Amino acid sequence: MKRVVLALGALALSAHVALAQGKTHKIAFQVDQNDPQVMNLTLNNVQNAIDAFAGMGDKVDIEVVAYGPGLNMFIKGKSPVGERIGAMSLEHPDVVFSACGNTLAKMEKAAGHKIPLLSEAHVVPGGVVRLTELQEEGYAYIRP
């Protein structure tokens, strides 16, 4: 009888562990500084999270939101991490790169012309608003 109880207990534990795997984690990264070190650290964190959760059998939804001076991360021809973002997008197409529309509009007004963004970046109305929405959707908030 003890063997049956132990076997059932082990079976229940292994089922619990199996159910725990395959979880989807959600992370929002904020970039608000025009600092190549911060931008690279953010991308390092993104890759580390992807690798760590994949190693656990889990999935991770990631969105990088840049606003203010951090929007330079997504400006074509100016981004110090543009090539890295391109490579990361090819390897991990589910990673979302969001550019603050408010910041972009102010930069374009000051420059007097359109400012091209990396093709991987998509414009959201406001960076802070987007981060708030993501947190309300259960995303963990990371500011490297």
Image (spheres, rainbow, N blue to C red):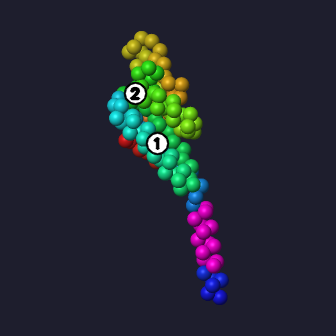
The amino acid beneath tag 2 is Pro
Q: Where is residue 131 drawn, in percent x and y? A: 46, 39
Is residue 20 shown above or below 135?
A: below
Tell me if mark 2 has few (under 14), some (14-19) or many (20+) residues whose alpha carbon lies within 10 angstroms of its own: some
User: Is residue 134 inside the magenta stretch?
Assistant: no
Tell me where residue 67 appears, x and y as whole percent.
Answer: 41, 30
Residue for point 38% across, 15% down: 110
Q: How many residues crowd around disc 1 within 10 Å: few (fewer than 14), some, or many (20 or more)?
A: many
Main SS of the magenta part reads helix
Residue at screen point 58% across, 58% down: 21
**Residue at mark 1 to residue at mark 2: CA–CA distance:** 17 Å
> Residue at the location (43% across, 32% down)?
66
Q: Tell me the number on the disc at residue 80.
A: 2
Q: Looking at the image, can residue 139 be seen? A: no
Q: Position of residue 80 (x, y in %)?
A: 40, 27
Query: Taking 20 as reference, is 131 above or below it?
Result: above
Question: In terms of sequence position, does the residue under pointer 1 or pointer 2 come before the other?
Answer: 1
- Judging depth in this view, the residue of 112 and 60 nearest the camera is 60
Which residue ends up furthest to the top in the rendered image?
112
Residue 133 vs residue 51, the one in the foreground: 51
Give the labeled residue for mark 1: 46
Amino acid type at image mark 1: Val
Q: Which residues are magenta?
A: 7-19
Q: Secondary structure at mark 1?
A: helix
Image quadrant where residue 13 sits? bottom right
Number of marks drawn:
2
Q: Considering the numbered disc 2 on the image, is that residue within a helix, a strand or a loop?
A: loop
Name the image quarter holding the C terminus. top left
Q: Is residue 3 above or below residue 20?
A: below
